[in-house]
Amino acid sequence: MAGSDEVNRNECKTLVPLHTWVLISNFKLAYNMLRRADGTFDRDLAEFLDRRVEPNARPADGVSSFDHVIDSSIGLAVRIYRPANVPAHGAAAVTVRVLDFFAGTPSPDPFPVIIFFHGGSFAHSSSSTAIYDQLCRRFVKLSGGVVVSVDYRRAPEYRYPCAYDDGWAALKWVASQPSLRSGDDGRARVFLSGDSSGGNIAHHVAVRAADEGIQISGNILLNAMFGGVERVESERRLDGKYFVTLQDRDWYWKAYLPEGADRDHPSCNPFGPNGRRLMGLPFTKSLIIVSGLDPTCDRQLAYAEGLREDGHDVKLVYREEATIGFYLLPNTDHYHEVMEEIADFIRTNVLI
């Protein structure tokens, strides 16, 4: 169980850089204001509090971005980030950059396409949330590729399997775009990535891709959100100490899972009593980033071990003294070393 708020807050401050502590604490404060005890959510206030940034088709610091609706029937949109090393001048130049994307042809030189799913426990944030916009730009720079950030539908208004369906729609859309194909075989070299709930979505989209014969170059999961009915040791030990409480996390699972489902639903506990093993499935390689001070770290470690037991290739990066969200700000060795791991994983697998 969680200790007193004051003790937990002081212990957290001794390990977490000030800027990160302020960032995550502000998120937590807002999140606490938005959840209601009856399971509803103050979406209007959430939209007001979410710090968002506009896309910039005119390059900024070597990266340009624009938004595009890929399914108007449900309003599903993506934000597309691309390297942009040549300066653009005037509105016409900006328009040409966007039109050039849709009129493009496959590149003979292979490059990665990272489909990114933002975090927020299935309920918060968006593809235009400032901190995720910044992370996607970092991914463009470290990979030299394209990032497609998915503005998936959020709970509790849209429960399971809406977020997975939106992720699948984004994957099929990426695969259909000539300008996102590259290499001798002319296919999209797709990496699926996400943090928190986004990591969970990446896993489930990758399973469906394997089922349907769509090749994925790799999965990159950052503190992926998994759970289960029976508490694991890290949940009992870290409950409430570093931003996350089990009570809060349980609320989000109840908001996302089908009515009446418990946390052993395969969405939450993919290798649990109701889950599915992946032996014999052509599941992609995985880079799994785990923070040792995340209460669900034992679940993420068990997920990595489950993939290995089923015969799949896993690179595990365990940062013992990192908390949730450490990858959002470049102010620790954890951040820089993990970004190097991600860059190396992409370089190694983009040609395969």
Image (spheres, grey):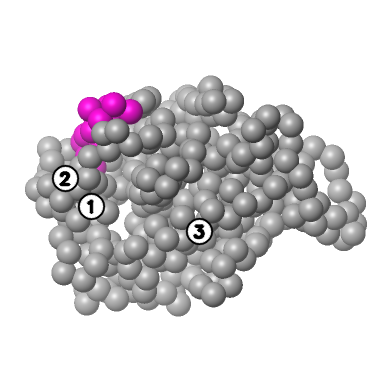
| Residue 204 in sight here | yes
The quadrant in which residue 20 appears is: top left
Q: Quick check: marks 1 and 2 in contact, CB under 8 Å? A: yes
Q: Read off the residue under disc 3.
A: 169
Instruction: Tell me which residue sits at (36%, 60%) in the image.
Output: 122
Q: Residue at x 66, y 51 (%)?
A: 177
From the viewer's side, name the closer residue of 147 and 7: 147
Look at mark 1 in the image and give the residue it sits on. 266
Q: Secondary structure at mark 3?
A: helix
User: Residue 272 — which label?
Assistant: 2
Depicted 267 relative to depicted 68: above or below: above
Q: Choose top left, top right, bottom left or bottom right for residue 43.
A: bottom left
| Residue nearest the observer in this picture, 92 or 326 | 92
Name which residue type carries label 2: Gly
Mark 1 crowdedness (10 Å alpha carbons): few <14, some 14-19, many ≥20: many
Packing grade of label 2 (10 A; few <14, some 14-19, many >=20) is some
Q: Nearer the viewer, mark 2 or mark 3?
A: 3
**The magenta stretch spans residue 307:** yes
Residue nearest the observer in this picture, 93 or 178: 178
Q: Which residue lies at the image location 41% right of the left edge and 30% below the top edge?
A: 285
Q: Residues within 10 Å of mark 3 (few under 14, many from 20)?
A: some
Could you tell me which secondary element the residue under label 2 belongs to? loop
Answer above or below: position of 177 versus 279. Answer: below
First to last magenta residue range: 296-312
**Image location of residue 307, percent across then percent down:** 28, 32
- C-alpha span from label 1 to label 2: 7 Å
- Residue 297, compared with residue 48, is above or below; it is above
Residue in the foreground of this view, choosing between 55 and 221: 221
